[in-house]
Image (cartoon, rainbow, N blue to C red):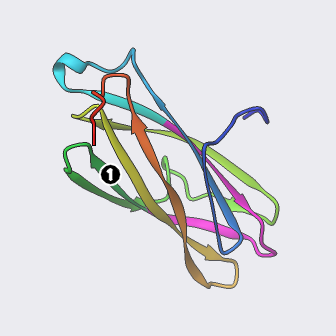
Amino acid sequence: MTEDVVFPYNLETWGVTVRVLPEFMDEESDPAGRRFLWRYTVQIENNVDHTIQLIDRHWEITDSVGRRQIVDGEGVVGEQPVLAPGETYFYVSGCPLAEPSGIMSGHYGMRREDGLEFDVTVPAFSLDSPHETARRN
């Protein structure tokens, strides 16, 4: 990743910073078929004095009509990365929805080299598409 990428969503938990950049994938979406697809890039930065490993993930995905999906699993994109102090890990994944907008939130289960386990919160991020109709409150 280049340093000029702006991550609009950032959160630090226990000295680990998670940054997220969601992007709507217009060419791969089919609004008429109720298929909307987002790519999201995640940066995880270890700012603590211990080596840590990402063990698992927990996602809560809610679309614009309130349907909620829970996604739990080992690692991310098939990996359980190990980050030494000061190291950064990037990955890219995707999220399909049947509605033109939604929100994702969750956490990563981490383990320090001494065996201590802790959760790192992923900042809630918005999945917005140009197909969402603006609503007045």
119 or 51, which is in the foreground? 119
49 on left or right of 25 = right
Residue 2 on image: x %, y %: 76, 32
Q: Position of residue 8 (x, y in %)?
A: 61, 43
Q: Decide which of 81, 94 is in the foreground and name it.
A: 94
The structure residue drawn at horizontal position 40% and vertical position 34%, both measured from the top left corner, is 128
Relative to 60, is 49 above or below?
A: below
Q: Quadrant of residue 95?
A: top left
The quarter of the displayed image where residue 132 is located: top left
**Res 14 quadrant in image:** bottom right
In the image, 127 versus 45, the foreground residue is 127
Residue at figure coordinates x 81%, y 75% from the top left:
49
What is the chief secondary structure element of the magenta stretch? strand
- Disc 1 marks a residue whose amino acid type is Ile
Q: Callout 1: 10 Å neighbours few (<14), some, many (20+)?
A: many
The x, y position of residue 88, in whole percent, is 74, 53
Judge left or right: residue 75 versus residue 114. left
Question: Is 70 left or right of 8, judged from the image as shown?
Answer: left
Q: Which residues are magenta?
A: 40-57
Residue 5 versus residue 129: which sits nearer the camera? Answer: 129
Tell me the SS state at disc 1: strand
The residue that disc 1 covers is 61
In the image, residue 28 sits, relative to residue 63, either above or below, namely above
